[in-house]
Image (spheres, helix red, strand yellow):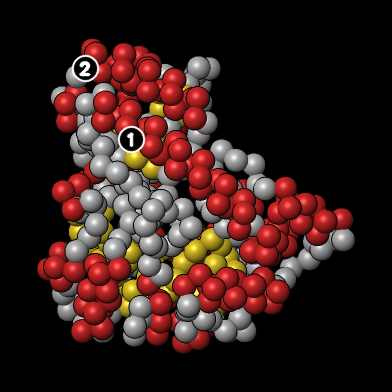
Amino acid sequence: MQNFISRRVQATPPSGIRKFFDIAATMENVISLGIGEPDFVTPQPILQAGIDSLKRGETAYTSNSGTIELRTALSRHLANLYGVSYNPADEILITVGVSEALYLAMTAVLNPGDEVIIPEPCFVSYAPEVTFAGGVPVMVPTYVEHNFEVTAVDIAKAITSKTKVIFLGYPNNPTGAVMTRQTMSEIAQLAEVHNLLLISDEIYDQLVYGVEHVCVPSLPGMRERTILLGGFSKNYAMTGWRIGYACAPPYLLDAMRKVHQYTIMSAPTTGQAAALVALEQGAPHVLAMRDEYDRRRRLIVDGFNTLGLDCFEPRGAFYAFPSIARSGLSSDDFAMRLLEEEEVAMVPGDAFGASGAGFMRASYATAYEKIEEALNRIESFMKRHG
């Protein structure tokens, strides 16, 4: 019966994240530092907007592209934050989370055999989405010595005659790395020289701590060769609402919209109503959540370093990426033993690519007090394994 399954799907392993959470779900006293999801409930004004939309009977499809009100508000939002402007009519597409936007981008631009350069460690779906679209992911490792920031030199070494896309995901999941303007500009120049498309996943754009987030299409010459991916899940604690977006010049967005029309029809109507209010009223709530994440960030990074799990300082998203070298364990063994012995769930670093081996991903999108208790349990674990 395996003959009925495509070779591309058969060759793609299951997500390395799920294994440990399937086990953790059967345990009563687990503290999870694994799920990449805000522990905040969606802020009240945004919640109420969704409720009000339902009460008004807004349960039909919207335009394929999303409501014009949401696209217009998003256009203003990006112009205000980053000075990059998109026409709501034909350069913005509302999607079912940034996950659909990623799928649409890869499906719309890749031909069989086209290569996509992807820095790793990276989010688990990047390479599989390239494969599912018929492309070839070319992974470029990053290193803690460079704060997990990919360099133009490393990308240049990976470029071949088949390269079509450079894919970037910063602020980064799983490392928390944020790319500097200088490095981003050097990569942008590389894309221009080699006539490459750049796809930028900026889902954590507002969750940065004391540094600047550089929006790729705002760089000189990049707007016309960039697909910007983003969403509401992380910044506004709206993961379950499933609202994302893609912004690009019409020649790119038209192709993505075509795939979207045949695959999805339109993003959830209720979620779009809530997302509109998120853009209009959500800024104070984003700042409050970011301040709390920052407090947790400092706790968990200092805690790991104190325990001998050397951890560079993450400057974005809500993940720490400590080294477990002193334990003498592999990432997979460390994660399994920590879960079994101390009931703390983290994700092995190599679930995010081979260059993540020897590290663990710890999400600090959980309560401060739970992080404190998790660190106490990890201290006990390290006394036996460190």
Q: Which residue shows up at 50% across the image and 17% down it?
A: 29
Residue 226 % position (x, y): 39, 77
Q: Are circles 1 and 2 on residues that touch, CB within 8 Å? A: no
> Which quadrant is home to the C terminus?
top left
Secondary element type, mark 2: helix
Q: Which residue shows up at 51% across the image and 70% down it?
A: 81
**Residue 255 visible in the current orientation:** no
Q: Amino acid at mark 1?
A: Val
What residue does disc 2 label? Answer: 385
Disc 1: CA contacts within 10 A as few (<14), some (14-19) or many (>=20): many
Picture layout, residue 326 above or below residue 58: above
What residue does disc 1 label? Answer: 301
* Of residues 120 and 81, the one drawn nearer to the viewer in this rendering: 81
Looking at the image, the residue that sits furthest to the right is: 56
The numbered mark at residue 96 is none
Disc 2: CA contacts within 10 A as few (<14), some (14-19) or many (>=20): some
Front of the two marks 1 and 2: 1
Picture layout, residue 323 above or below residue 306: below
Secondary element type, mark 1: helix
**Residue 319 visible in the current orientation:** yes
Mark 1 or 2, nearer chain start: 1
